[in-house]
């Protein structure tokens, strides 16, 4: 069962298709994390510093992705 079907079965869909897409992506990401790490976010007892470091790394990646897209839009 895919994330969309799971969300629909569990009444997690809204009237907004954009929100529904994001919900489905969160469900799929959670399943990937469970498979990869064998635990939920709630069960992860990493230190607060580790959580901050992980977030910083993710945000740095996001900035790079945005810069790449911006350059492509400007330069064609």
Image: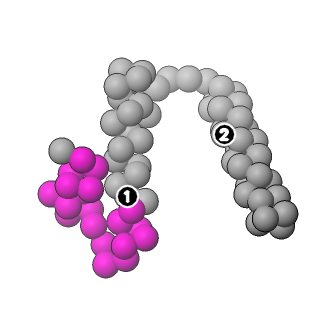
| Picture residue at 35% right of the left edge, 66% below the top | 20
Image location of residue 34, percent across then percent down: 35, 29
Which residue lies most toward the bottom here? 15
Quadrant assignment for the C terminus: bottom right
Which residue lies most toward the left here? 9
**Mark 2 neighbour class, 10 Å CA radius: few under 14, some 14 to 19, many 20 or more:** few
| Picture residue at 77% right of the left edge, 52% below the top | 68
**Mark 1 neighbour class, 10 Å CA radius: few under 14, some 14 to 19, many 20 or more:** some
Is 49 inside the magenta-drawn segment?
no
Residue 31 numbered mark, or none = none
Q: Nearer the viewer, residue 68 or 4?
A: 68
> Badge 2 is on which residue?
58
SS assignment for the magenta stretch, majority: helix
Q: Nearer the viewer, residue 61 or 70?
A: 70
The magenta stretch spans which residues? 2-21
Marks 2 and 1 sit apart, C-alpha to C-alpha, by 19 Å
Is 16 inside the magenta-drawn segment?
yes
| Picture residue at 82% right of the left edge, 58% below the top | 71
Residue 52 visible here: no
Numbered marks: total: 2
Residue 43 left/right relative to 73: left
| SS at mark 2 in the image | helix
- Kindly indicate the quadrant of the structure image that contains residue 37: top left
Q: Disc 2 vs disc 1: Cβ atoms closer than 8 Å?
A: no
Residue 23 numbered mark, or none = 1
Residue 12 left/right relative to 50: left
């Amino acid at each position: 069962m895919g994330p969309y079907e799971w969300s629909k079965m569990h009444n997690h869909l809204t009237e907004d298709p954009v929100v529904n897409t994001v919900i489905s992506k969160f469900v799929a990401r959670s399943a990937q994390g469970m498979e990869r790490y064998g635990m939920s976010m709630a069960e992860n007892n990493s230190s607060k510093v580790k959580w901050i470091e992980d977030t910083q790394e993710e945000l740095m990646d996001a900035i790079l992705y945005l810069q790449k897209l911006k350059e492509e839009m400007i330069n064609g």
